[in-house]
Amino acid sequence: MKTFKLMATCAAGIEALVGKELKDMGYTCQVENGKVLFEGTAYDIAKTNLWLRTADRIKIIFGTFKARTFDELFEKTKALPWEDMLPLDANFPVSGKSVKSTLHHVPSCQSITKKAIVTRLSNYYHRKTKLAETGAVYPIEVSVLKDVVTLTLDTTGSSLFKRGYRTEKGGAPLKENMAAALIQLTTWFPDRPLYDPTCGSGTIPIEAALIGLNIAPGLNRHFACETWDIFDNDIFEQVRQDAKNQIKKDVTLDITGTDIDGSMIEIAKRNAEKAGVSEHIQFKQMQLSDFKTKKEFGILISNPPYGDRLLDEDKVHHLYQQMGQTYAHIPTWSKYILTSDLAFETYYGQQATKKRKLYNGAIRTDYFQFWGLRPKKNTEQ
Ligand code: SAH
């Protein structure tokens, strides 16, 4: 099978997590800003689309070259073997972006790229009339960075965060791949309790259950490349079947999600049902200050309101204060809280063990981490 140069794209700040996921799957990769580079066959494209929990998209890097003029862009694009990927009826929209480059007018870059590919394919397929573009979609991107052009084909289609289980969401939902990233940044192991006190539509508990049960996040969705000629019909069937066989049947998880808003709890339950994990999560309506537990060494992950999004500032600060007071009673638990309020610690009343800058969509946030006490090693045998 042919090997492609591939790129897994992701939100700024979580590249290393995508790199770790790829390494754990056995790939050698290179972590860069907002993306991770690796190589693989059509089978690997199917597998990574199905399994990567924190990435946005898997793209094929079809060509890279320097270009400072539109002529160069046209000729170098036309010189690439597009017919290897695109059949006669391919529908190939071209999107674009340009950063710090001579070719800075993005619509022109897009139309020149399109024209070059059309010319190449028309010559190859001996067509004098317009290409029909009635077949499978091959989303192409022309990206220019410091005069270096990268032409990619998007194998994913709608972003990987769309797992398909979340049909309903509240006012400020986390993207599913961001929720998975928040979990992977903790020390949670599926044998420990995991608790989200502001669970909203249930994204964090549901992603944790998918991890705990080893359910591939993309098992219930489709990908742009499934209808491409290079994908024999059985590649996706095979990776899906393999994924189904890898689901753990005999694990007991201790995952809880609560929220003050009863209608969100109903939504969270329906989403968990759709994701096939409802029997592994307890959802309950509750305000966070009512939390009590005898359990130890749990992991608490929260994406509370940030002010101006869901609640006004004073109420948000009061909520952060309540969090600090409530969680002071569970010193063995590690608490991880994502908020855009950079003064969070002042209200929470404790200095974070560690902070990590992350982007929740366009919002710059910090992931405040308050590590709990470590379980004592049992030295008596
Ligand atoms: N991560 C969630 C979104 C959380 S938005 C998702 O992906 O859907 C913040 C949530 O905090 C809202 O659902 C809101 O109802 C809840 N909330 C606000 N005040 C609360 C309180 N005092 N106790 C518990 N939950 C609260």
Image (spheres, helix red, strand yellow):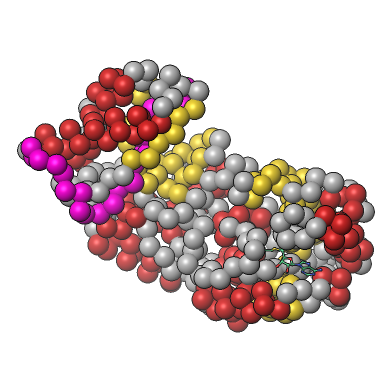
Q: Percent from the top left, x then y, of residue 155? A: 36, 50
Instruction: Assign the C terminus to one quadrant of the image.
Output: bottom right
Q: Nearer the viewer, residue 253 or 199?
A: 199
Q: Percent from the top left, x then y, of residue 98? A: 45, 29
Q: Residue furthest bottom?
A: 279
Q: Percent from the top left, x then y, of residue 119? A: 17, 33
Residue at figure coordinates x 54%, y 39% from the top left: 34
Is 183 placed above or below 355 here? below
Please state if 252 lies on the left or on the right of 124 as rendered: right
Q: How many marks?
A: 0
Specify the segment rendered in magenta. 127-152
Please state if 68 lies on the left or on the right of 171 as rendered: left
Residue at figure coordinates x 59%, y 68% from the top left: 169
Q: Quadrant of residue 129?
A: top left
Is 307 placed above or below 143 here? below
Determine if residue 304 is in view: yes
Q: Percent from the top left, x then y, of residue 317? A: 86, 56
Residue at figure coordinates x 49%, y 60% from the top left: 162
Determine if residue 14 is in view: no
Please state if 364 lies on the left or on the right of 316 as rendered: left
Question: Is 133 one of the magenta-colored residues?
Answer: yes
Please state if 16 lies on the left or on the right of 35 as rendered: right
Is 247 placed above or below 27 here? below
